[in-house]
Amino acid sequence: NVRRGTTTASSSSSSAAASASAAAAEFLVALPPPVLTSASTNVADMAAIAHIFVDPTGCHVLASARNGEAYYLHSTAQKAVKLAGFGPNLDGTTGCKRVVPSSTDESGKSTPRQLGLAAGSYVTAVGWDRAHGTEGSSKKIVLGTSMGEVYEFALNGSDHGAATSSSSRSSSSSSGSDEGLPVLLHRFDSGRGKEERGRVGGGGGAAHTVVSGIHFERPGGSSVPSSSSFYQDGPFVLVVTSGMAKRTRLHTFHTNLSSSSAKSTGGAFSSFAATFSLEGGRSSFIELPGSVAFADLLVCGDDFSIKTETGLYYGNIHTAGSASIVRQLSAGGAAESGLLPYSDVDDKGGMALPTATAMTPNHFILLCGADDVRFVNRVALKAIQNERVNWMSMAKMAGDDHIGAGAAELLMDSRRPDQVWLRKSRCLVHVSSSCETRDEWMYALQKCLDNGRLLSGSTSSSSSSSYDHTDALFEHAASLCTNNLQKAVVTATRAEFHLLDGSVDVASKFMADCPPQLLPFDKTAVLLGLQSLEIKVPKERFLSKNAQDALASSNVGLISYLSSKMRLAKVKDDSVSYTMVASWLASLHLDELSRKSKTSIDDTLQQKRQNEARVLSSHNYFQQVLSSNSGNISAEQTAPAILGVMGAHDIDASEYAGCIGSSSDIGAAISASLDGYFGPDGALGAIRVLSEAPFEQAEPYYYKFAPSLLARAPMATVKCFLAKYSEGLSPSKLLPAFMQYDSRRKELLLSKGGANSSEDFVDDNKASVTYLEGAIRLGCRRTAVYNYLIRLYSAMEDEAPLHRFLSVHIPSTLSNSGGPSRRMRSSPLDMNYALRVILKTGRHFRSAVKLYVALGMRQKAVELAINVDPSVAREITRQSSDPAEQKHLWLMIARSAAAGGSDGKDVVASVASVLNECGPDVLSIENVLPFLPDFTHIDQLQGDICLALTAYSSEIEQCMKDMSKCEQVCADLRKEINRLEVSSISVAESAKCASTKTPVLSQESDGDGRYVFPSGHAFMENALKDVVRPHLNEQQSTRMENIVGSIDKLLVQGTNNATTSGPPSLRPEEEDRLENLQCDLDGLIAAECPLTGAIMIESIDKTFADDDEAYA
């Protein structure tokens, strides 16, 4: 029977769990009866369960019996299933058979393979697929047996569930089906196992090599997707073999991807076939000391351990990729491996072989006997905790006398690697360490120091990689720390390690990170600076020879330490400490600079070059230190202090610039730079100070020192000004400096006859133009900048820059109104000023013409262009959209063409070309005849004259036709007027209003007006107003109301003036006004019949009644 269930236990390492019989979810699962054969002697012993294996998911259980049978139980099944191919079949025959696969290798040979376990063997180890196993399937797994064989197998919950019986599985196996049978991959006692050949016990005696542990990983770990080809890179397999009188060995197997066998293996062969084949696989092994019956292989993460006769062998498996695995094959696939002797675990040195072992991420757990549990730290490799389990008291508490009997074992949970359980009989005890990471950092730190001691005697060829490894160990120790105090101890120890090794610069950085309680500032700084001052170190402070030599050679260690402290002071906003450290640091750098600059007469050329390189390096580093002070919180206090240090070392005044600039005294920095050097060098230093200083502080000094900077380095100053334009440097405020510079250029040019460059003044005729052009290109919209640039352009002999500038900022065409366009009105270019400046020079007329056109003065532009370039004048004339203006301009061009001819023929030809270019729609022959001489041959104008006469005849005929049409229209109008004067409309006595249905001619309606339309419909005046009013627009409706109000007002006034019961009395002018108002009202409401006119047509898409009326 197999007992299955869950057991709840206390988390304390010393308390026992409740008895398994008390678990509510516990029940027994009956196993199928064992198969008896003729060779069976002791049935009870052979059918006993030897091992039970549970996969990492907890869903698949494999039970192995000593007679070779194997049983499978799924977490959802109610009964166990006997697996085919394990042990004897139901008919008593062996389950092992050899078959020939359907596929062949490259040589064309078919290699037989064995299906099923060999007779007499049983499963002793299982390698689970931790990365891809699921609840439904375990995927491919590797099995080890008691006869040193390795098989490939798979467990499938759907195939081996409760619905599948053992008889059906066995019958399918005996019927010849090979599906679901284990496949032999490797045998250690024979076949390929060369490692056993020729050794004692390897020839197949009574004792066999037992596979006591199997573990496999895939290259890349779990990053390989499960949907991809499972073994495209081949698995990496660890196999442990042992046995009485047998060697304990750790075997590694890996697929050789370059072999043809690995590429061609497939089909009937399993996925592990290439890994264990002679051609496709690579293997190696490590032989461990001693011999044990069963060497357990335990795996926790990437670490493993093996129980041997003399100690615990441990190591680390690297599975990051195929290449890293292959590199580890020479060492058996294990990195950071070693052997932990059992004697080191016991203080008395008399510890025997442990009963069971287990692993956690930080400890080895050894069970000595049945009740002694020892925790061994994996870093320190020594026992740190001992626990003893009182089984007798647990038996009394549980009321089970069987607890104290039998062997005990340690159980691990792959899903919770820090949890370990101790099982004896039916009782479980939680034996994990109370604090898994307790003192782990301390042991890791001790390992770093031990590794450092080993490195002190190593050769230089391997020291670099070894020191990198030691730094990695220090980082690992720091990562294990749980509080700041532990981290400070690790940092201080690391600093001490590097100091004793001679790496002073590295040690000083870690010293700066230590709190003052461990490494006080004064003592640390004095220690790092004593050797350079040739002061002996106190006797109580030990320094190695390497450390003494490194400290005596230079101040690099102290400089590095102070630099780190200065950064920390800046982060903490400690201005006092920052100023003190910065001043000390500046003094050290200047000492280094002066010491390295000293040379001897006896120095060789190479030594002199080395000294020069060192001086340059120190100088650059010192300048970097000065520039690092810029913009920090304590610049105002730091810079004066550094300035005093520099003055004490007699540094040139120009060296003060960067330091003073960092203290916000930018004006003094620029003055120091300008006074320190004459010519461009001083200006360049001042420009550097301005560029490095914060713009908000430096902006006033740009305007103040602009004349001096332009005089010494004009182009460099221009580039600096343009670079700061985007930050807000105003071109308008810099304009006086450029005007002063240009004025001085002219004065020097007149006084020295052209040689106007000196030490204090550099003449550059492009400086001002370059800056102004650049500022405009960057987006400057100041009119003063544009005007000054126009002035500079006008002073040049070449008109091309001026004309190009105007072409960019003046459109080629005008607006429709003939004046400047909206774009030109919003342009910062003052065209009137530009025109005055250009005309004053008496040259650059092409640019003046362009300005005339932009200002809308086409006549002026044409007058000037006729004398400069007639083609430009004609182009301007064609752009005019006003016919009268265009005709006038063409007449000006024609007059100029006629006046420029030397004889009559030339004049006629010039005038004819003008006529042809403008076209007959603008000018005709009679327009230009006054410009021709009195005696002119008209041969060249004959065609134009004929065309003019033909056009006149056509116009006369068209006028006569129009007059005839007008006479006919007038006659028709007279007839219509006469007809309307005599026309009349008859209204019946019974006629009713088309809107109100009241009689039109009744006496009740005498006070209301009446309207009769040619269509026969009659309306009362008020009713007609109501009908027409909705169809009038807002203006017409308002007009009608005003007219009605005026008429009513006049009628009321006339009624008041009339005699009793008489008609209204109005003056003649009031009667005329009333008649006009009535005519206007008639035009609004009686222009057409509402029932037959446009009102009816517009209302055709409307309903006959409103919605309210339709549903009333």
Image (spheres, helix red, strand yellow):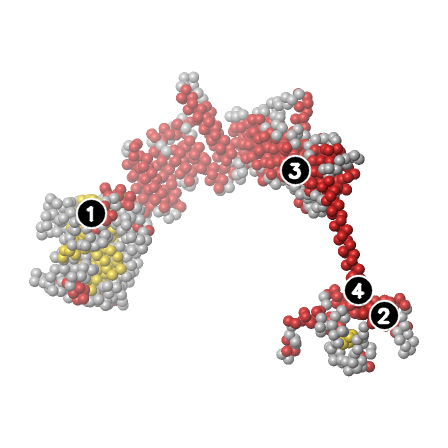
Position of the N terminus, as image quadrant, is bottom left
Marks 1 and 2: CB-CB under 8 Å?
no
Q: Residue 1019 or 754: which is nearer the viewer? A: 1019
Compute the Cα span from label 1 to label 3.
85 Å
Reading the image, the residue beneath label 4 is 973
Reading the image, the residue beneath label 2 is 1050
- Assign a secondary structure to mark 4: helix
- Assign a secondary structure to mark 1: loop
Q: Residue 807 or 922: which is nearer the viewer? A: 922
Reading the image, the residue beneath label 3 is 806
Of labels 1 and 3, earlier in sequence is 1
| Residue 840 position in % (x across, y down) | 73, 32
- Assign a secondary structure to mark 3: helix
Say if 1105 sits above or below 843 in the image: below
Of labels 1 and 4, earlier in sequence is 1
Amino acid, disc 4: Leu
Compute the Cα span from label 1 to label 4.
117 Å
